[in-house]
Amino acid sequence: MSFSLARFFLHLRLGVSSNTATTRTRKSFGYLLLAPKATKFTTTAIHKDKSQKSSEEEEEEKLLVVVGGGAAGVYGAIRAKTVAPNLNVLVIEKGKLLSKVKISGGGRCNVTNGHCADNLVLADHYPRGNKELRGSFFNMHGPVDTMSWFVDRGVELKIEDDGRVFPVSNNSSSVVDCLISEAKCRGVSLQTGKAVTGASASASGKFLLKVEKRTLNSVEHVEADYLLIASGSSLQGHSLALRLGHSIIDPVPSLFTFKIEDSQLTALSGVTFSKVVAKLKLEDVQRNIPQLTQVGPMLVTHWGLSGPAILRLSAWGARYLYSSGYKGKLIVDFVPDLHIEDLKSMLSQHKNRFPKQKVHNSCPTELGLVKRFWKYILDHEGLVGDTLWASVSNNSLVSVARLLKHCTFEVKGKGQFKDEFVTAGGVPLSEIHLNTMESRIQPNLYFAGEVLNVDGVTGGFNFQNAWSGGYIAGTSIGRLAGNANLEGAIRVNRV
Ligand SMILES: Cc1cc2nc3c(=O)[nH]c(=O)nc-3n(C[C@H](O)[C@H](O)[C@H](O)COP(=O)(O)OP(=O)(O)OC[C@H]3O[C@@H](n4cnc5c(N)ncnc54)[C@H](O)[C@@H]3O)c2cc1C
């Protein structure tokens, strides 16, 4: 257990904030409901008779609608309601709440990353967003804040050796349950099975939303004071953003494995390499892009190649690979800590020491290669099973060394990566204020999470973007709503 993790266990306070919130009574919703002709009209909103309300209450009844009950939406909703308890907060989710959190990290949920104390280093883990996220974004709510947030609400966390943070329970339900219970305790209204299918801004600056429940063929119209779009990579969310004046950078997949058509390689499925240097070469990319060379573990799969080094390449190369039809060259150095000349002399010494041994059965242990892969390399060089080291020519030794340092694979396509998959593209960061997450185009409109043109490499960075964005948006909306209430109360007192 690392030092920073010990800190979180020390700070464990079960349900403190939730308990205080359970006593709060929930306010009614005062949506303005607009019934268009020929649509069946339903609503779950509870209405008070206007005459029963004081003008102070009317001032209080501002409504934030959050589109999407994923990580960013629920976290943002909780934060907004925490900052402005009088604000009505409604999350509309078309499917199930937090469904990606539930399946994330192979069911364990890699909540964030615990190895990036420096926010500049942290920002470098985002192929889209690395420049923009260097500023205030993670200072306002970074991985340490996220970890504290969950630990303070009873979710014990652990940091694994590679920096990935998981719940100690190894079960994503701990995270899902915590978020849902916190949202409910705070009085956030969570509505599922409904999609926001239309949005426009009225002259008064409010948002008119069309909400559809497909199973019942019903349409609701909701008027919101604040709108947070946290719809992930959904095209429906993109179309809402477009209707509200934003542009969309074309979505393309990120974080995928490489399909390699090499039956001898894929026969090695399951073989892992703890450290390789992998370089991606694409025809259309002539300039040197440092991130298209990655160091790290690699794994052979039934399809081709995977593992952290490959996934990072897929993320940094996502757009280029999309343009090239997922075709390119992958050059792998399997012994990156050895200079080629040292490797040659190591092989030569091995030959001299073990002349009577068969090459297939005798690999220099210093190379740390598994037998199956060593055989793959030798087969490539035409060194068949019975060949003795004594009969290996110097030229063959040099070729083996070269192949280990510079092994070229043809990337033929995109495989799948079932543990994590994200979308590059979405609302451009230039169109929002990152210190508030508010739109630069439409006042009181906010965005958070994957709907933005931000995506990270594997390791908890994608959720961190969702937590940070949700938190910042929730804080900004809460403050704005709180100030609006304060101003309203002052006005009421003056009257
Ligand atoms: C299999 C898998 C595993 C992953 N594992 C990890 C991991 O361990 N760690 C990590 O950091 N990242 C992981 N990721 C990435 C991570 O899940 C996403 O980056 C993250 O969920 C983005 O959060 P979000 O709230 O922006 O979007 P989402 O989680 O996608 O939530 C958006 C929600 O909005 C809803 N929605 C969309 N449009 C509408 C609409 N019009 N009306 C109503 N609702 C709407 C959607 O149904 C969805 O529930 C994983 C991804 C996948 C696919």
Image (cartoon, grey):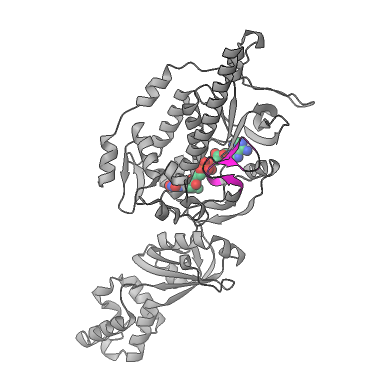
The quarter of the displayed image where residue 320 is located: bottom right
Magenta range: 431-450
Q: Is residue 325 part of the magenta span, yes or no?
A: no
Q: Position of residue 407 (x, y in %)?
A: 42, 76
Q: Position of residue 311 (x, y in %)?
A: 46, 59
Q: Nearer the viewer, residue 444 or 425?
A: 444
User: Residue placed at 43% from the left, 35% from the top?
Assistant: 176
Q: Is residue 446 part of the magenta span, yes or no?
A: yes
Tell me the quarter of the image containing the C terminus: top right
Q: Nearer the viewer, residue 7 or 353?
A: 7
Asked if one can make out residue 404 in the rendered structure from this viewpoint, the answer is yes
Q: Is residue 297 above or below residue 436?
A: below
The quarter of the displayed image where residue 354 is located: bottom left
Q: Residue furthest left?
A: 353
User: Residue placed at 30% from the left, 71% from the top?
Assistant: 369
Q: Residue furthest top?
A: 52
